[in-house]
């Protein structure tokens, strides 16, 4: 029966190549160290270990079962657990299981980490998949005696010390802010969308229908503030609704719609049809963008307090990430606004290139194929 249920879970497992790669790790303090549960996407394990032995594009339970030792060895070798300067060796516990998350099937590995002394603090070094996918994230829950905390580890932030005495929803608020910043900077499609909206911010339409530079910096800045604020408000709205389980959309549909929005924003710079409402376009993408990270929070099953602080920290990070991009882009664009090269090569040529890349993304996401290594 267990094999039959696992087969039902695995059959619909089709890789969503553009959904961010995440794994879910929960560590809980135990008398002699920690107990752990680690959920890793089978699509990621297949990409690394080649689990699909018959090459038919679909994983069967038998293919996963036959590679249990390889999976366990690979996953546990990518995690270092320690306390008080001493390592806590990890050993698997029980057989490998399979579970469904919002974006597909995951291998579930239970393990123990035995520590030589009673742990008062925890040191983690997480390196799963970073050599293959620098955008991979480890979503970590650590439960101590008095509470629990959530943190996100990435390729640039993969080692962390976790005090266990005062764990709370606020323990790693700064880490969630950092995750929000990385979410914006690592999401190339969202950066290109933001760039497509910002390129015309230092220009205005002439009576003849062409582009001409704005006279003052103030109007350009106000336009950009409206765009960034609209994106953040919309992102926060759907992120909250989706994380609370009130709204849900298929990942492929969301990612495809994001690609469409990039195409429309870029096309509007070349063939203007929407004037004075680019903040509304930013709001529309923000609504879509919020669903991306929401599935991660839903899969974590955080309590109400933990969910609220995680959402707050992540949204603060998204806003800071956007403001940093604006702070770099806007002064340079304002200085170049009067040059012909800006209006023709950068605005029109750049927008055309952005639109072309987004068209490829749309084909990839709609047809579930991979063309661009982005």
Image (spheres, rainbow, N blue to C red):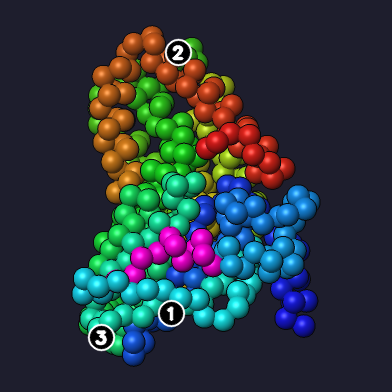
- Which residue is tagged 2? 344
Taking the image as drawn, is residue 241 in sight?
no
- Which numbered dot is residue 341? none
Residue span colored magenta: 72-82
Query: In screen coordinates, is 84 left or right of 226?
Result: left
Judge left or right: residue 90 versus residue 104. Answer: left
Q: How many other residues sit within 10 Å of disc 3, few (<14), some (14-19) or many (≥20)? A: some
Earlier-in-chain disc, 2 versus 1: 1
Q: Where residue 137 sits: x, y (%)?
A: 44, 57
| Viewer-closest of 138 and 35 | 35
Vertical arrangement, residue 159 with respect to residue 163, above or below: above
Q: Quadrant of residue 328?
A: top left
How far apart are labels 3 and 2 at the CA level? 66 Å
Q: What element carries label 3?
A: loop
Residue ID at (49%, 18%)? 348
Q: Return the residue at label 3.
A: 118
Whether residue 368 appears in this view of the structure is yes
Q: Give the residue displayed 42% in from the left and 32% down from the top.
A: 195
In the rendered image, which residue does mark 1 sit on? 112
Q: Quadrant of residue 203?
A: top left
Q: Is residue 283 above or below residue 100?
A: above
Tell which circle, 1 or 3, labels the residue nearer the N-terminal end.
Answer: 1
Residue 107 on image: x %, y %? 59, 68
Going 25% across and 83% down the picture, which residue do you hit?
117
């Amino acid at each position: 029966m267990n094999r039959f249920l696992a087969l039902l879970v695995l059959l619909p497992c089709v890789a969503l190549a553009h959904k961010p790669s995440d794994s879910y790790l929960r560590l809980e303090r135990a008398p002699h160290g920690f107990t752990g549960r680690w959920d890793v996407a089978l699509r990621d394990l297949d990409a690394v270990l080649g689990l699909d032995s018959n090459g038919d594009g679909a994983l069967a339970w038998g293919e996963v079962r036959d590679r249990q030792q390889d999976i366990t060895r690979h996953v546990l070798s990518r995690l270092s657990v320690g306390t008080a300067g001493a390592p806590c060796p990890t050993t698997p516990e029980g057989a490998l299981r399979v579970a469904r998350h919002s974006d597909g099937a995951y291998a579930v590995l239970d393990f123990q980490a035995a520590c030589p002394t009673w742990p008062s603090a925890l040191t983690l070094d997480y390196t799963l998949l970073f050599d293959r996918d620098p955008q991979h994230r480890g979503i970590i829950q650590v439960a101590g005696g008095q509470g629990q905390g959530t943190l996100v580890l990435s390729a640039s932030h993969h080692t962390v010390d976790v005090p266990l005495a005062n764990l709370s929803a606020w323990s790693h608020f700064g880490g969630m802010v950092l995750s929000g910043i990385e979410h914006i900077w690592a999401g190339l499609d969202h950066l290109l969308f933001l760039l497509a909206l910002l390129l015309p911010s230092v220009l205005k339409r002439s009576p003849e229908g062409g582009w001409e530079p704005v006279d003052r910096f103030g109007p350009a800045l106000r336009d950009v503030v409206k765009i960034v604020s609209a994106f953040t408000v919309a992102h926060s709205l759907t992120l909250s609704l989706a994380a609370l389980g009130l709204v849900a959309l298929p990942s492929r549909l969301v990612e495809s719609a994001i690609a469409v929005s990039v195409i429309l924003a870029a096309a509007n710079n070349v063939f203007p049809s929407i004037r004075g409402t680019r903040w509304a376009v930013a709001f529309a993408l923000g609504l879509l963008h919020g669903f991306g990270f929401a599935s991660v929070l839903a899969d974590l099953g955080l309590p109400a307090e933990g969910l609220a602080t995680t959402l707050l920290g992540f949204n603060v990070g998204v806003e800071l990430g956007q403001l940093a991009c604006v702070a770099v882009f806007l002064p340079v664009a304002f200085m170049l606004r009067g040059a012909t090269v800006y209006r023709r090569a950068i605005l029109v040529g750049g927008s055309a290139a952005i639109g072309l890349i987004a068209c490829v993304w749309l084909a990839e996401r709609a047809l579930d194929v991979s063309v661009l290594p982005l």
